[in-house]
Amino acid sequence: MNKTVTAIVVVATLVFLGGGVWFISQSNTAHTSPAKLDAFAKCLSAKKITMYGAYWCPHCQATKKDFGNSFQYVNYVECTVDTQKCSDMNINGYPTWIFPDGTRNEGQMSLRDLSAKSDCPL
């Protein structure tokens, strides 16, 4: 094989593998029923886990989309409205998840990661 064909094969393989990884990551919550998402969101709230965000934040929008209608059960603070609460909690980026033990995660979390961190089943 010449170098051009080898390069094309390598690029095609990388694109194929990248697409597979993307598909798997997108399907992590695609098959989660609304009832399970409701229970998951309610579990997070019961455990006093809170998401701080802003309506204009694309990562916050993506997280809300992951939860779908179940997001209504998530403890959520809109930092463009409740600026004092966000300031008091030293929120520097969106979204920020704060857990009852004081730990925080700044940046978007997958629902699987949030489930693992919270011990709330997904």
Image (spheres, rainbow, N blue to C red):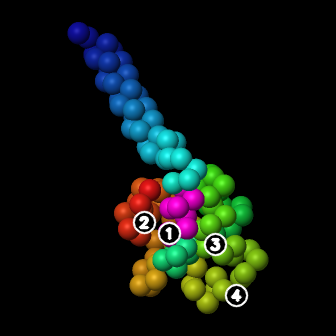
- Circle 3 crowding by C-alpha within 10 Å: few under 14, some 14–19, many from 20: some
Disc 3 and disc 2 in contact, CB within 8 angstroms: no
Disc 4 and disc 3 in contact, CB within 8 angstroms: no
Q: Mark 2 points at which residue?
A: 120
First reached walking from the N terminus: tag 4 or tag 1: 1
- As helix, strand or loop, the secondary structure at mark 2 comes to loop
Disc 1 and disc 2 in contact, CB within 8 angstroms: yes
In the depicted structure, whether residue 81 falls above or below residue 111: below
- Highlighted magenta segment, given as a residue range: 37-44
What number is the disc on residue 76?
3
Tell me the quadrant of the picture where the C terminus can be found. bottom left
Nearest to the eye among marks 4 and 1: give it: 1
Distance between the alpha carbons at the discs numbered 4 and 1: 26 Å
Can the viewer see residue 8?
yes
In the depicted structure, whether residue 82 falls above or below residue 107: below
Quarter location, residue 114: bottom left
Distance between the alpha carbons at the discs numbered 3 and 2: 17 Å
What number is the disc on residue 84?
4
First reached walking from the N terminus: tag 3 or tag 1: 1
Disc 3 and disc 1 in contact, CB within 8 angstroms: no
Q: Which amino acid does label 4 sit on?
A: Gln
Near-viewer residue (10 or 34): 34
Q: In this view, does 48 lie to the left or right of 58?
A: left
- Circle 4 crowding by C-alpha within 10 Å: few under 14, some 14–19, many from 20: few
Q: What residue type is labelled 1?
A: Cys
- Circle 1 crowding by C-alpha within 10 Å: few under 14, some 14–19, many from 20: many
